């Protein structure tokens, strides 16, 4: 103890040295101190360590102290990530973030293996192919899940309370998106309302949406529902190009703000859009992030579309890659602001990473939401993490925990496929099946729950909302087996409560967006 005390006292600078320390060490002195600490660890620490491991840990720590989205990788991993973004690697269709120290499902591609297995946002990934993934970054885990098309990966999932979670394992096939387009589900919801879903802001996203709306107009659609739920973002300039289709020339879509002058930039439309007068409703949820939030915020600020759903994820940072010896650092250099000046990015300064992710899809602190902004028509808006919809809709009932186990054990197929094959192939039967939800309960849900309880040996308790969601999924599977994927997609859209709610707002759209007291949308 005496030796320890002596060492501790000796470490304190005396007299003038302490006064210098109070004045603040120079950058050179800080680097000297850092180098000295590394050297002492390498030469005196009880276990053998290398400079390579220490420096990498230091780099990761420095970047994490900046914000939760800056990161460092090897050149090899960076090239693989680029290949993944280009669609050259197959995946189960998951988007992952680290939440409270655990790899967590942020969103998933509709119709992907992850979607079919019943995975949902907030599921935590425990292991991949029997290897524990604790400590892996989101990027590293994403690469671990990717691979050759057709290969399979076993994923251990934890769901529910962290102290007593439900755990299960699913086997997911790696697939490429079924279509080269980023748009899916293009169809008429009724005689005058078109619908399309944008999966992500890929290199052709704006062009894909334009083509889809032209198709819908050819079907005589006079108004459109644009679905951005679960859209994780992508190329931010595609959000500008998409907004330009609905806005007049030289309209501010969003702007970026950073420390360097080059980061301060306005993104404006060039010419007038082809759909400037098209009535538009945009759906968002807690899985809508980045470029999806920038687009939704712009439509909202300009009173160009009614935003429906749930508060978005709250991630809107501008990042760029800087190449360093043997690696790449992805660094945040700017924030994205909506046209009226709202920050989309939720607060991260002064918060631990766990605290930061706890705010996903939630409002910011009181300080974040204190300022009132206004749309072009003077509707009041507040900042804070994410985009708050004009009309907040209740959450869609999630599939139960045991759904993924049932899917992995082919129970879903055994019920839905057998029922699907009994349906007639004619158009009348197809129309009746897609529209008549009353027949799904006795023909699908009842036998399915009986098989689940018998095969899995569980109570499989449900409630009406959960049973409606199970019915939708089973009925869509039956439609896919009997007819095609388009039929399944049409059924899901027709029975989706968010989409059906959107239809009810078109008759009041101009009043709701006008800024009049009578037309103020709820949900703020």
Image: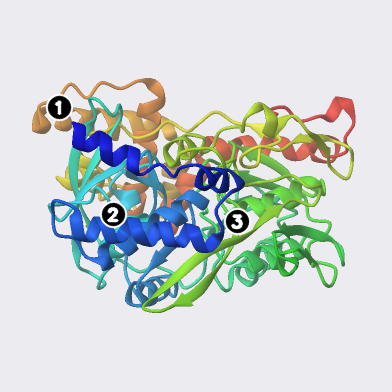
Above or below, comparing residue 449 to residue 238 in the picture = above
Q: Quadrant of residue 270?
A: bottom right
The percent position of residue 410, horizontal first and vertical second, equals 17, 47
Q: Quadrant of residue 365?
A: top right
183 on left or right of 370: left
Which residue is pictured at 14% across the width and 59% down the height? 48
Q: Residues within 10 Å of mark 1 (few under 14, many from 20)?
A: few
Q: Residues within 10 Å of mark 3 (few under 14, many from 20)?
A: many
- Residue 317 marker: 3
409 on left or right of 294: left
> Which secondary structure, mark 2?
loop
State the quadrant of the N terminus: top left
Q: Quadrant of residue 179?
A: bottom left
Above or below, comparing residue 299 to residue 450 in the picture = below
Residue 64 visible within the image: yes
> Which secondary structure, mark 1?
helix
Q: How much space separates mark 1 and mark 3, taking CA atoms?
A: 47 Å
The percent position of residue 90, horizontal first and vertical second, equals 32, 69
- Residue 453 marker: 1
Q: How much space separates mark 2 and mark 3, taking CA atoms?
A: 22 Å
For disc 2, the marked residue is 136
Q: Residues within 10 Å of mark 2 (few under 14, many from 20)?
A: some
């Amino acid at each position: 103890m005496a030796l320890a005390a002596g060492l501790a006292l000796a470490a304190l600078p005396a007299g003038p040295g302490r006064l210098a320390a109070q004045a603040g060490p120079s950058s050179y002195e800080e680097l000297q101190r850092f180098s000295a600490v590394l050297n002492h660890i390498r030469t005196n620490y009880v276990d053998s360590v290398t400079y390579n491991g220490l420096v990498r840990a230091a780099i990761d720590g420095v970047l994490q102290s900046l914000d939760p989205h800056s990161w460092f990788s090897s050149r090899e991993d960076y090239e693989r990530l680029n290949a993944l973004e280009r669609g050259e690697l197959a995946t189960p269709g998951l988007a992952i973030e680290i939440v409270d120290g655990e790899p967590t499902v942020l969103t998933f591609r509709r119709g992907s293996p992850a979607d079919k297995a019943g995975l949902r946002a907030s599921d935590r990934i425990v292991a991949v192919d029997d290897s524990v993934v604790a400590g892996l970054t989101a990027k590293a885990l994403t690469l671990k899940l990717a691979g050759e098309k057709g290969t399979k990966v076993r994923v251990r999932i934890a769901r529910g309370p962290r102290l007593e979670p439900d755990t299960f394992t699913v086997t997911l096939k790696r697939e490429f998106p079924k279509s080269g387009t980023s748009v899916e589900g293009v169809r008429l919801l009724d005689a005058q309302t078109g619908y399309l879903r944008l999966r992500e802001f890929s290199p052709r996203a704006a062009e894909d949406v334009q083509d889809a709306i032209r198709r819908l107009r050819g079907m005589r659609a006079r108004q459109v529902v644009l679905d951005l739920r679960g859209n994780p973002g992508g190329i931010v300039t595609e959000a500008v190009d998409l907004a330009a289709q609905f806005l007049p020339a030289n309209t501010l879509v969003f702007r970026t703000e950073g420390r360097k002058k080059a980061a301060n930039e306005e993104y404006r439309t060039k010419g007038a859009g082809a759909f400037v007068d098209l009535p538009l409703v945009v759906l968002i949820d807690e899985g809508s992030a980045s470029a999806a939030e920038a687009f939704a915020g712009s439509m909202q600020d300009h009173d160009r579309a009614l935003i429906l759903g749930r508060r978005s994820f709250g991630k809107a940072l501008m990042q760029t890659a800087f190449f360093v010896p043997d690696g790449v650092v992805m660094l945040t250099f700017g924030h994205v602001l909506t046209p009226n000046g709202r920050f989309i990015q939720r607060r991260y300064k002064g918060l631990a990473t766990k605290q930061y992710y706890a705010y996903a899809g939630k409002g910011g602190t009181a300080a974040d939401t204190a300022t009132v902004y206004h749309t072009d028509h003077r509707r009041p808006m507040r900042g804070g993490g994410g985009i708050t919809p004009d009309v907040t809709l209740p959450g869609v009932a999630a599939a139960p925990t045991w759904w993924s186990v049932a899917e992995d054990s082919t129970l879903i197929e055994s019920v839905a496929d057998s029922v699907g094959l009994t349906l007639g192939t004619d158009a009348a039967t197809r129309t009746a099946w897609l529209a008549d939800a009353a027949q799904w309960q006795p023909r699908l849900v009842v036998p399915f729950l009986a098989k689940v309880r018998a095969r899995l040996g569980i109570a499989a308790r449900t409630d009406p909302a959960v049973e409606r969601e199970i019915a939708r999924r089973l009925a869509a599977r039956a439609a896919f087996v009997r007819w095609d994927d388009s039929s399944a997609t049409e059924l899901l859209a027709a029975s989706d409560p968010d989409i059906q709610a959107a239809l009810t707002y078109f008759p009041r759209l101009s009043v709701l967006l006008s800024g009049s007291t009578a037309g103020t949308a709820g949900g703020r």
